[in-house]
């Protein structure tokens, strides 16, 4: 059974940092791009960051550029999201996802596997 399990969420003050981790099990995703998405109450799920199969290419949503960094360790089958200078508008449930493809993409439908999500709350 394929599983993606996120961890590292929590409550932080504005300007603080959190590091989210996603551990995959049941199969290896070393040939797949990985991504992070988030969903705030009453809003649609939105793209945050993605990284290609090798880790050699990554890109972020404009809203988090310069603050968030995605990385992966194929040997450990994990993908992380380092979040710095957090803002109240970053408050959401954050989801890890594995793409059907090897190259990065921001579109939700490109991702076949999803974690259960981890809550990030940023207080002002």
Image: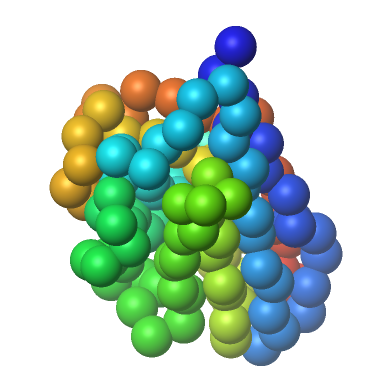
The spot of residue 31 in percent (x, y) is 29, 39
The spot of residue 15 in percent (x, y) is 66, 88
Going by the image, does 102 lie left or right of 97? left
As drawn, the residue found furthest toward the top would be 1
Tell me the residue at 30%/39% (across/down).
32
Taking the image as drawn, is residue 117 in sight? Answer: no
For the N terminus, the image quarter is: top right
Tell me the residue at 50%/25% (across/down).
27
Going by the image, does 81 lie left or right of 97? right
- As drawn, 75 above or below 116: below
The spot of residue 49 in percent (x, y) is 37, 59
Tell me the residue at 54%/64% (across/down).
81
- Scheme of colours in the image: rainbow
- As drawn, 106 above or below 109: below
As drawn, the residue found furthest toward the right would be 11
- As drawn, 87 above or below 48: below
Q: Nearer the viewer, residue 42 or 47?
A: 47
- Name the image quarter holding residue 80: bottom right
Q: Nearer the viewer, residue 45 or 101?
A: 101
For the C terminus, the image quarter is: bottom right
How many numbered markers are drawn? 0
Going by the image, does 92 lie left or right of 43? right
- Name the image quarter holding residue 88: bottom right
The spot of residue 21 in percent (x, y) is 64, 55
- As drawn, 39 above or below 113: below
Going by the image, does 28 lie left or right of 32? right
Q: Nearer the viewer, residue 110 or 100?
A: 100
Taking the image as drawn, is residue 1 in sight? Answer: yes
């Amino acid at each position: 059974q394929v599983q993606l399990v996120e961890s590292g969420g929590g409550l932080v003050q504005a300007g603080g940092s959190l590091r989210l981790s996603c551990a995959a099990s049941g199969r290896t995703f070393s040939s797949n791009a990985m991504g992070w998405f988030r969903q705030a109450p009453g809003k649609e799920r939105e793209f945050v960051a993605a990284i290609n199969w090798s880790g050699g290419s990554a890109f972020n949503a404009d809203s988090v550029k310069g603050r968030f960094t995605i990385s992966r360790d194929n040997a450990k089958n994990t993908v992380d999201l380092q979040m710095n200078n957090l803002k109240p508008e970053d408050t959401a449930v954050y989801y890890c996802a594995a793409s059907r493809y090897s190259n990065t993409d921001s579109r939700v439908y490109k991702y076949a596997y999803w974690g259960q999500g981890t809550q990030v709350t940023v207080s002002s």
